[in-house]
Every structure is written in structure tokens, then in C-alpha cells.
Image (spheres, helix red, strand yellow):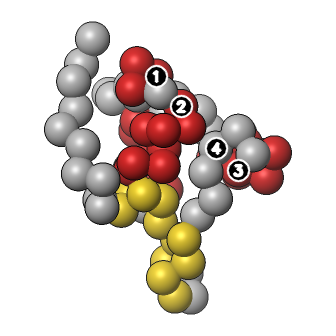
Amino acid sequence: MLELPINSGALLRLPEVLRLIPVGKSSWWAGVKSGRYPQPIKLGPGITVWRIADIHQRTGPGNLWLAS
């Protein structure tokens, strides 16, 4: 299993999130809407991020993947 150093304050944009969670964009957004994945943080127009700690907490550390 790959261990990632987690900085709880780290913010990830969608492409970075999708490298960690092996789902497509539409599936990710459907999961956000259903509550399976954490809600995003809007930093400004066109800038949406997620806290890596929120993703880690919601999906579990064993479920983070690094897609090639």
C-alpha cells in the first residue's frame, strides 16, 4: 500500500483529486451531490478545491490511489 504524507491543510483541485480517487469527473460530482465525497470549497470564480484531509476522512486512507 502506498503511504502519502498528509498535510491536513493541503488543497487539491479536481484533476489532483481524480489522480487519488479512481473515478471520472461525472462520477466524482455525483458522489459530491450524494454525500459520498466531501463538499468542495469555492475560492473564487472557476476555482474549486477540496481539503485532502476531508477526502482522506471520507474515503479512508486505504482507498487513495495514484493513477498513472
The foreground one among 24 and 64 is 64
Determine crowd level at label 4: few under 14, some 14-19, many 20+ residues with C-alpha closer than 10 A. some
Q: Residue furthest top?
A: 1
Determine crowd level at label 3: few under 14, some 14-19, many 20+ residues with C-alpha closer than 10 A. some
Q: Give me the disc on residue 32.
A: 3
Which quadrant of the figure contains the C terminus? top left
Position of 68 with respect to 43 (left or right) is left
Q: Earlier in the sequence, mark 1 or mark 4?
A: 4
> Distance between the Cα atoms at labels 1 and 4?
12 Å
State the residue at coordinates (40%, 18%): 62
Tell me whether circle 2 and circle 4 mark residues in contact (CB < 8 Å). Answer: yes
Q: Secondary structure at mark 3?
A: helix
Q: Which residue is mark 1?
A: 63
Q: Earlier in the sequence, mark 3 or mark 1?
A: 3
Q: Residue 11 location in percent, x, y? A: 36, 62
Determine crowd level at label 1: few under 14, some 14-19, many 20+ residues with C-alpha closer than 10 A. some
Which quadrant of the figure contains the N terminus? top left
Instruction: Give, as a three-letter code, the residue at label 4.
Output: Tyr
The foreground one among 57 and 1 is 57
Q: Which residue is mark 2?
A: 59
Q: Residue 10 location in percent, x, y? A: 29, 59
